[in-house]
């Protein structure tokens, strides 16, 4: 990874669509208990090109979050295949998937998922530290400044509001310049006034960094900001739309 | 300036040395450091006890190794129950560079004020000791004793009998002036009991006392000093071959071994308690790590999401556990050094050898490292569960730390191995070490089983009709991550140990209290010669004292068994004091064969043996053996086996013959009686010593007082160590209460939001802590009562029911500790504004 300043890296022009960064083929996920078997996902197929954005929408229990987790290699599919940057996740061990995530993936969660014992800047630096990179505190501080937290870099998550925590999460998601960003209900825990700037920031950073985006949401307005919208119901994709404004 | 990316470590071991692991471990501990440090204190007491015990042993062994000759006073000591002849002495003297002779026997001393007391008299002739010194006050008293008649006694006894140097004391027919007080005695011969104080006289004066007859209970001793380079071991063999096979010999090496064995025994016994303390501490640390990692499941999932490999996530928490263990081990080692040097400094004047109060660094390092390893081993149990935390928890939440018992099997094996290694450190016998660790595991398993059962029962007995506060308080025990079992284990183990020690002490004290049993003797009149028996009996009758037993005693040795077969080992050298009578006494039970009241005509003499000694010698019913009764061979046949209750104070023997065989053999009688008051004892002693100076009056109550004092000291040491286990439990109690504080805080906020008053919230907490205390006390008391019943039934033959008062006190103490500690650590739970807690998402 070269050491390019975040400002420079986030301001370049969107890359032309070249090849799929994410491919999902015949994905199936079944939860088994002692007495029950529940099919959460079945026959899911879709692909996302580099730099593209996709919103997954659907009612609760439709399998959106499960799909996101499988795409990011957080869980194992029962059958089918997920290719992330051309690499089939099912062929990788847990630790190889973790290494791949560290290299390619950024995350934004509904409940922020910051590490409570780390300050804002320390949280942002974790993906870099996990790659063995040090000395990039200035970039992290700059990124926090870009999301409006320049004066709160040493605050702990408990000392920040929900909106501020999500902004730290955004900075953490982009600090290592991922190829793809997975966002699970990024505004689900925020009120409308707070959510607006976060969404604006998410799409701006995504656009500037040329990152692909997979977004799970209940919010049609948020989904409408993605180029493609995938509708799910009962564990399968029932419709897909390409929006005219998208990249 | 950014640095080049470095590859992440590929395995747990490498990850443990990666700087980021430690950086993250430090950062992750931010809000938990106090709790974690408190838990780390749990292993402090176990390691401190182990370090102190092992270091003390090392110091004593070092002291004994360098001062073994001074502990014996010579290069070789030869002891015989019968007098060593001049011819034998001449042979011994020819083998050595220098010699001293000694005769030792129990006898009564009469003080100027008329008081009498039993002493172990040591008549010493020659320049003994050859190594080390005997210190006296005045300093020249020991030298004067070699040149002039006199006697030396301990200062405490001079004070007790209000005697001073120059006063005359009576020893048989002799009146000897007190030359001074002994401040550092001559080395004791191993076989003399420590129950009578020693008095030193000149060997030349012993004969004039008129106390020693041919059958007296005396021992002859010769102390030898060899020329440099002469091997004591070789000379021992030569003496057996050329002088007398029946002599008992002891070299400095033998004494070192004897002391070493005694120290080993003490160390092994104390080591078990110390090991239990360490294991409890390590369980506490493992419990702390489990609670900590459980709280960190979301953080670990986030790290895994961000690309952290499993072994690196494990390494972060292993580093924390290791740091905790290291902190505990270092504090424990420092405390152990303090204990060891403190004990040596405290007893510096009272030990028979010089031991420098300096730390045994190698032992300290080894023991602390072993303790640290055990602690880390226990911590592995929760740590390896980290590998099973899925990054998908970030999306779903609500995951807990789960593990599979079978996967943990290698860890349990590793732990067992570590503990066996630690046990081997204090006892080289691997079978005993295995048994020790197995016993410890079983004890903890039983403790955990009882605790789990009580928790289960508590859960089942709560009824919907009970008041809400009571139901809620009890139900709180079952909330997730409450660590109820760990709490019960730590407080329960402490209760169990302390109550068991108190109950066992009570049983021993009951047994030692001779006044409780009507037919138990309190006075032994020993060395009564056959022609003195009637006279002594008359004295007892005159003083209206009962004659409980009048038993003849004859010394003998086994010459051969089953024809020409010589008895093996110490049984071949052992002298048996035997008796003859036509009936069993109340403390004996016939377990096999037939009891003979008389000698059948023509056949061998029927012999009854105590069952255990018969087994040790390898004899069974019907076997014939030849006994050497002071030079006269007697053929006997084993016709019965007896079980003897040695815990009674009656006169009992390994070998009992029927009347009609030993009457003419040289021997003496022992007569027992019982006095009601110390004054009656004193009067009896005075009259007996006046009429029969050679007869020793042994006051059993005095001996039992000494036994009680010794047991009291041992009990004190055990209690201190048990206290260490309680101390190990204390941080665990505090830690578990602190761990539950967040949950209680959240619950109290919820309750208050729903309208509960602060008083109601406090009542729920009190009920919860009181239930915890009661269950802990019950866990400990059930086991302690079981141990007490087993001891009372099988060892002491006493009432198996423990005193209700003691149990009530244990209940009250454990419950009080739990409630007070719990409330102290829950201060402020009711004062936090609900909104603050709800917003903070605690």
Image (cartoon, coloured by chain):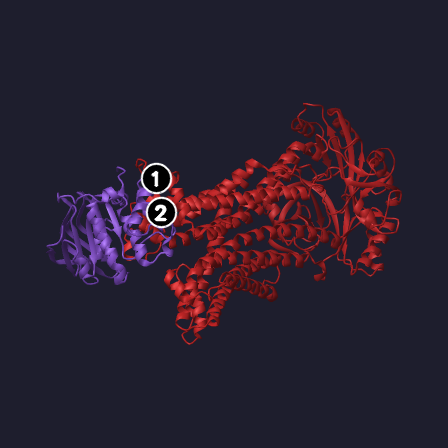
Chain colours: A purple, B red
- Give the vertical position of B342 relative to B596 (above or below): above
- The residue that mark 1 highlights is A135
- Residue A91 at x, y percent in the picture: 21, 43
- The residue that mark 2 highlights is A122
**Near-viewer residue (B614 or A94):** A94
The chain carrying label 2 is A
Q: Of label 2 and label 1, which has the lower sequence position?
A: 2
Provide the secondary structure element on which disc 1 rests. Answer: loop
Which residue, as the protein is rendered here, is positioned at the far bottom?
A: B465
User: Would you say residue B305 is visible in this rendering?
Assistant: no
Report whether B751 appears left or right of B397.
right
The label on residue A223 is none
- Give the vertical position of B484 relative to B308 (above or below): below
- Residue B649 at x, y percent in the picture: 70, 54
Label 1 neighbourhood size at 10 Å, few (<14), some (14-19), many (20+)? some
- Residue B715 at x, y percent in the picture: 63, 52
Residue B566, quarter of the rendered image = top right
């Amino acid at each position: 990874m070269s050491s390019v300043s975040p400002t420079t890296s986030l301001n370049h022009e969107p890359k032309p669509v070249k090849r799929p960064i994410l491919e999902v083929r015949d994905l199936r996920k079944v939860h088994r208990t002692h007495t029950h078997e529940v099919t959460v996902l079945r026959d899911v197929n879709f692909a996302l090109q580099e730099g593209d954005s996709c919103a997954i929408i659907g009612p609760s229990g439709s399998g959106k979050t499960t799909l996101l987790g499988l795409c990011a290699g957080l869980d194992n599919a029962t059958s089918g295949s997920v290719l992330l940057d051309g690499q089939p996740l099912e062929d990788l061990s847990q630790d190889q998937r973790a290494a791949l995530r560290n290299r390619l993936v950024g995350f934004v969660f509904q409940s922020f998922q910051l590490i409570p014992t780390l300050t804002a800047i320390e949280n942002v630096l974790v993906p870099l530290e996990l790659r063995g990179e040090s000395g990039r505190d200035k970039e992290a501080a700059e990124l926090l400044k870009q999301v409006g937290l320049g004066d709160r870099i040493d605050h702990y998550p408990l000392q920040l509001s929900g909106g501020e925590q999500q902004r730290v999460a955004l900075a953490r998601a982009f600090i290592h310049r991922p190829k793809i960003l997975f966002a699970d209900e990024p505004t689900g825990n925020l009120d409308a006034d707070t959510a607006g700037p976060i969404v604006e920031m998410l799409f701006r950073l995504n656009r500037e960094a040329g990152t692909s985006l997979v977004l799970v949401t209940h919010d049609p307005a948020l989904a409408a900001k993605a180029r493609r919208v995938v509708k799910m119901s009962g564990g399968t994709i029932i419709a897909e739309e390409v929006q005219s404004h998208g990249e | 300036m950014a640095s080049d990316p470095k590859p992440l470590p590929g395995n747990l071991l490498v990850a443990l040395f990666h700087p980021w692991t430690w950086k993250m471990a430090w950062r992750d501990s931010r809000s938990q450091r106090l709790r974690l440090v408190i838990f780390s204190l749990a292993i402090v007491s176990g390691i401190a006890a182990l370090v102190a015990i092992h270091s003390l042993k090392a110091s004593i062994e070092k002291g004994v190794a360098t001062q073994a000759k001074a502990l014996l006073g010579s290069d070789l000591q030869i002891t015989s129950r019968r007098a060593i002849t001049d011819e034998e002495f001449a042979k011994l003297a020819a083998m050595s560079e220098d010699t001293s002779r000694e005769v030792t026997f129990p006898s009564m001393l009469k003080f100027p004020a008329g008081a009498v007391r039993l002493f172990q008299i040591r008549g010493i002739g020659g320049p003994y000791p050859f190594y080390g010194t005997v210190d006296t006050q005045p300093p020249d008293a020991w030298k004067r004793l070699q040149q002039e008649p006199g006697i030396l006694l301990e200062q405490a006894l001079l004070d007790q009998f209000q005697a001073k140097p120059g006063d005359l004391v009576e020893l048989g027919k002799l009146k000897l002036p007190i030359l001074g007080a002994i401040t550092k005695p001559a080395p004791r011969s191993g076989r003399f009991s420590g129950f009578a104080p020693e008095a030193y006289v000149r060997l030349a004066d012993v004969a004039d006392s008129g106390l020693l007859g041919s059958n007296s209970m005396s021992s002859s001793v010769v102390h030898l000093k060899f020329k440099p380079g002469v091997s004591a071991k070789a000379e021992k063999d030569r003496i057996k071959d050329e002088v007398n096979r029946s002599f008992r010999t002891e070299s400095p090496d033998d004494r070192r071994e004897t002391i070493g064995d005694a120290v080993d025994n003490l160390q092994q016994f104390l080591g078990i308690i110390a090991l239990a303390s360490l294991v409890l501490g390590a369980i506490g640390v493992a419990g702390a790590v489990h609670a900590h990692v459980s709280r960190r499941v979301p953080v670990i999932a986030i790290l895994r999401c961000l690309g952290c490999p499993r072994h690196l996530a494990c390494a972060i928490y292993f580093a924390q556990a290791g740091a905790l263990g290291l902190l505990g081990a270092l504090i424990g080692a420092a405390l152990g050094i303090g204990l060891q040097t403190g004990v040596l400094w405290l007893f510096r004047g009272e030990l028979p050898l010089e031991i420098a109060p300096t730390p045994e660094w190698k032992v300290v390092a080894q023991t602390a490292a072993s303790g640290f390893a055990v602690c880390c081993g226990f911590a592995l149990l929760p740590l390896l569960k980290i590998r099973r935390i899925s990054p998908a928890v970030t999306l779903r939440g609500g995951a807990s730390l789960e593990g599979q018992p079978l996967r943990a099997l290698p860890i349990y094996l590793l732990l067992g191995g570590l503990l066996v290694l630690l046990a081997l450190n204090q006892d080289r016998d691997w079978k005993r070490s295995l048994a020790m660790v197995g016993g410890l595991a079983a004890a903890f398993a039983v403790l955990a089983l009882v605790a789990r059962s009580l928790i289960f029962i508590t859960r089942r007995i709560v009824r919907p009709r009970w008041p809400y506060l009571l139901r809620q308080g009890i139900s709180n025990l079952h909330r997730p991550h409450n660590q109820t079992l760990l709490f019960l284990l730590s407080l329960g183990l402490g209760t169990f140990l302390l109550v068991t020690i108190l109950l066992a002490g009570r049983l021993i004290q009951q047994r030692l209290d001779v006044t409780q049993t009507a037919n138990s003797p309190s006075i032994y009149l020993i060395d009564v010669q056959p022609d003195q028996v009637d006279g002594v009996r008359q004295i007892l009758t005159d003083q209206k004292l009962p004659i409980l037993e009048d038993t003849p005693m004859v010394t003998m040795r086994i010459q051969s068994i089953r024809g020409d077969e010589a008895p093996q080992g110490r049984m071949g050298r052992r002298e048996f004091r035997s008796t003859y009578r036509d009936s069993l006494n109340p403390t004996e039970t016939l377990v096999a064969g037939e009891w003979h009241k008389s000698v059948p005509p023509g056949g061998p003499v029927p012999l009854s043996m105590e069952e255990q000694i018969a087994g040790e010698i390898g004899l069974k019913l019907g076997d014939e053996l030849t006994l050497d009764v002071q030079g006269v061979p007697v053929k006997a046949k084993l016709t019965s086996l007896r079980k003897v209750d040695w815990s009674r104070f009656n006169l009992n023997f390994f070998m009992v013959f029927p009347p009609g065989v030993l009457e003419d053999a040289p021997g003496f009688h022992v007569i027992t009686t019982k006095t009601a008051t110390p004054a009656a004892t004193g009067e009896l002693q005075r009259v007996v010593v006046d009429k029969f100076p050679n007869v020793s009056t042994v006051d059993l109550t005095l001996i039992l007082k000494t036994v009680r004092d010794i047991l009291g000291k041992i009990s004190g040491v055990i209690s201190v160590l048990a206290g260490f286990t309680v101390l190990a439990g204390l941080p665990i109690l505090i830690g578990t209460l602190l761990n539950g504080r967040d949950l209680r805080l959240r619950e109290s906020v919820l309750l208050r939001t729903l309208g509960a008053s602060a008083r109601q919230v406090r009542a729920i907490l009190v009920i919860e802590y009181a239930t915890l205390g009661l269950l802990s006390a019950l866990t400990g008391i059930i086991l302690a009562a079981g141990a007490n019943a087993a001891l009372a039934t099988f060892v002491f033959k006493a009432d198996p029911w423990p005193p209700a008062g003691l149990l009530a006190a244990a209940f009250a103490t454990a419950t009080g500790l739990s409630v007070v500690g719990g409330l102290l650590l829950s201060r402020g739970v009711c004062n936090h504004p609900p909104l603050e807690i709800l917003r903070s998402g605690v």
